[in-house]
Amino acid sequence: MKRITFLAIIAILVAFPVAAFAHSVAQPAESPSMAAPGAMPQAIPTFVITDVVQDTSVTIQTDNFPASDTFEVHMNFYGTQGIGGTIVDTINTGAGGRLTETFSIPAVFHGQYKIAIRLESTTSAYYAYNWFYNNSTNGGSTGGGSIPPGYSGYPTFGIADVTADQDVTITGLNFPAGDTFDVRMNYYGTLGVAGQIVETITIQPDGSLPDSKYDIPVFLHGEYKIAIRLQSPTSGYYAYNWFYNNTSGSTGGGTIPATYTGHPAFWIAAVSQNQSVQITPSNFIPNDTYNVRMNYYGTGGYAGTVVETVTAAADGSLPDLVYAIPPFLNGQYKIAIRLESPTTGYYAYNWFYNNTTSPPAPAP
């Protein structure tokens, strides 16, 4: 999906920039009261579309949703991932896990061909997003796609080889068997969204890619960096990355470390208003370097001001957990923070309320 967790999170969401390994990657954030969330779920929350009544309602089925959490349901125009959309409902997850819910489609979206829907927690800040065709299903396709039977996790890929202005070779991991993916390329910074389709592939029964080398389209010849995206038009799962468009040296988005699994994440531990924020990291890649960026809320921290650069220790811990809030964000109600590796391309992002917690964050 985003999956969108996607899934949309493709689902995919959750994981979420430079080289990305995502679908609906749902990243944890802070609790509104203490600016720190509870324990992170063991799996990424996702949902799929199960039914649509044109211009009237959409029904979803969730999976892996955290228990006793509250989610706002947003709808917005297709392509927005539901960000900033109309709040159509608020639900409590109760026991969590798999839920079935139906939501009304706001009048502003009546007549739209596709609509984005997003569930975002007001407490833990986990989220998942998807989309659907705004037509009555009657057994037809509902858009965002269903989760392939027996599939868990989300697809990712790393860059294996590049021949400048000719082709790029990738290494795929955990793609859903039997699913079809469009391979898109676009300018760096677009995440490959709406890029030129250079090939369409169907995943093998064992989850491997039938072809892993793709031609670089002419309009990207001469570009320093290029975004590449594999996105399924059926299930909605996707993954994206980027690479340096040169034959030798670093290939950009980074290969997946042989012993590394999962993805880095962090949550907010403490805040001192307009001064600093302290984080608690999890599963950062050993010996990898990360730029710590801050930007306005809603940006995911993308292209934000670099406030510090840290290198993870051999055990994956970070040498510094407290970062100064840049002056241009002073007075902001919410702030986005992102740790992004310029070497492997892995990243994690979160956000926090810019008010002092108890105890406050230490001075940077």
Image (cartoon, grey):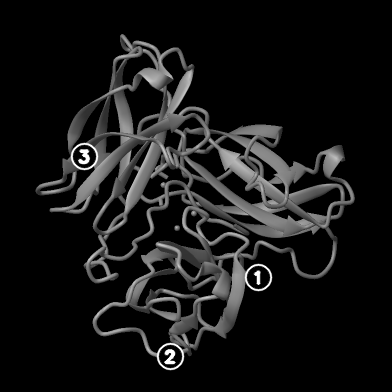
Identify the image quadrant of residue 247: bottom right
Q: Position of residue 46 (x, y in %)?
A: 32, 44
Q: Nearer the viewer, residue 134 or 237?
A: 134
Label 2 SS: loop
Q: Which image quadrant: the N terminus?
A: top left
Give the mark nearer the N terminus: 3 vs 1: 3
Type of amino acid at the residue the image marks with label 1:
Pro
Provide the residue designation for mark 1: 342
**Which residue is at the far front?**
331
Q: Which residue is mark 2?
A: 363
The structure residue drawn at horizontal position 41% and vertical position 21%, both measured from the top left corner, is 108
- Circle 1: is it few (<14), some (14-19), or many (20+) Cα within 10 Å? some
Mark 2: few/some/many CA within 10 Å (<14, 14-19, 20+): few
* Pointer 2 or 1: first along the chain: 1
Question: Are circles 3 and 1 on residues that touch, CB within 8 Å?
Answer: no
**Is residue 362 in view?**
yes
Looking at the image, residue 362 sits to the left or right of residue 99; the answer is right
Mark 3 Cα shell of 10 Å, populated few (<14), some (14-19), many (≥20)? some
- Marks 2/1: CA distance? 26 Å
At label 3, the amino acid type is: Thr
Residue 251: percent from left, percent from top: 74, 63
Instruction: Classify mark 3: helix, strand or loop.
Output: strand
Question: Which tag, 3 or 2, sits closer to the chain's start?
Answer: 3
Residue 5, position as x, y percentages in the image: 38, 45
Q: Give the residue at x 61% y 70%.
A: 305
State the residue position of label 3: 90
